[in-house]
Amino acid sequence: MRDITIAKSEFVPDQKAITKIQDFQDDPELFRYCSLPQILKYVECFTGPNIMAMHTMLINKPPDAGKKTSRHPMHQDLHYFPFRPADRIVCAWTALERVNRQNGCLVVLPGTHMGTLKEHDYPEWEGGVNKMYHGVRDYDPQQPRVHLEMEKGDTVFFHPLLIHGSGMNKTQGFRKAISCHYASSDCNYIDVKGTTQENIENEVKEIASKRLPEAVGITFQDTWAFRGRLVKGEKRIL
Ligand SMILES: O=C(O)CCC(=O)C(=O)O
């Protein structure tokens, strides 16, 4: 994924526009992160013994190019997932260097994981917003928030309903992190038609059919089934 502002600039060398590498499940070196016993030990407390790595990301938040597009709007990850139950899904997010408010650490709204899935859409940001960066629609900026300042190698585990995002990178360096969303292989796919997730379903299907024109009739659920990898235990439903 490319940062919208940087990708438009003809002066920036191409690799510097890379904000994220998603779906590294077929890269043995990067995928080693998802199988680390030190991570799975905690993941298992949420998922139980049958663990699927569903979504992988190497995040390379670039120095902000002046339009605040390095921010990640406040969102709930469950918005992107057509599988349940939410309590059997967890994200592990590991800092690859010191992250703080200057380089755009994670920001969370404590306790929101006990709420419900909210409506999401593109925020109306003056400088634009990156592709697929949906945010909670009725987000109240006055709600108490916690900035997760972390050292290199620190890992945070969080629930898919937790409202979170990340700030602008005000430094000249690329803020790097690696993350994986895990789910129990006993989770099941749901139909999101008629729900708040229908907008992301349509967007994902549109992108999938552009990238894979031969995959006629590909569903939102297929795009997840195709990426999920078993990391421990038995493959069951997902
Ligand atoms: O690493 C970040 O800046 C935020 C990542 C995130 O919340 C996401 O990609 O869903």
Image (cartoon, helix red, strand yellow):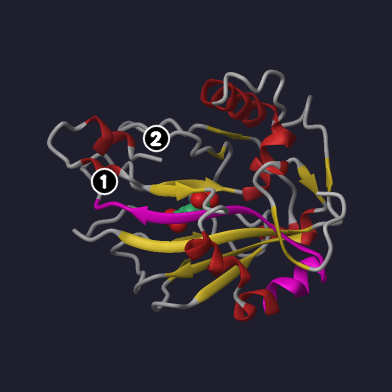
> Which element is circle 2 on?
loop
The part of the chain drawn in magenta is 42-63
Q: Which residue is mark 2?
A: 129
Q: Is residue 53 magenta?
A: yes
The residue shown at (21%, 43%) is 65
> Which element is circle 1 on?
helix
Q: Quadrant of the N terminus?
A: top left
What's the distance in space between the residues labelled 2 and 1, CA to CA?
19 Å
* Mark 1 CB lies closer than 8 A to ligand 1: no
Q: Which residue is mark 1?
A: 15
Q: Is residue 217 magenta?
A: no
Q: Position of residue 203 (x, y in %)?
A: 58, 26
Say which amino acid is labelled 1: Gln
Image vertical order of residue 30 relative to residue 199, above or below: below
- Which is nearer the N-term, disc 2 or disc 1? 1
The residue shown at (58%, 38%) is 138
The residue shown at (82%, 71%) is 49
Q: Position of residue 42 (x, y in %)?
A: 68, 77
Dividing the picture into quarters, in which one does residue 9 lie?
top left
Local crowd at mark 1 within 10 Å, few (<14), some, or many (≥20)? few
Front residue of 120/93: it is 93
Dividing the picture into quarters, in which one does residue 52 lie?
bottom right
Q: Position of residue 210 (x, y in %)?
A: 53, 21
Q: Is residue 173 visible?
A: yes
Q: Is residue 167 visible?
A: no
Name the side, left or right, on which 7 lies relative to 195: left
Image vertical order of residue 58 relative to residue 130, above or below: below
Image vertical order of residue 210 relative to residue 201, above or below: above
Say which amino acid is labelled 2: Val
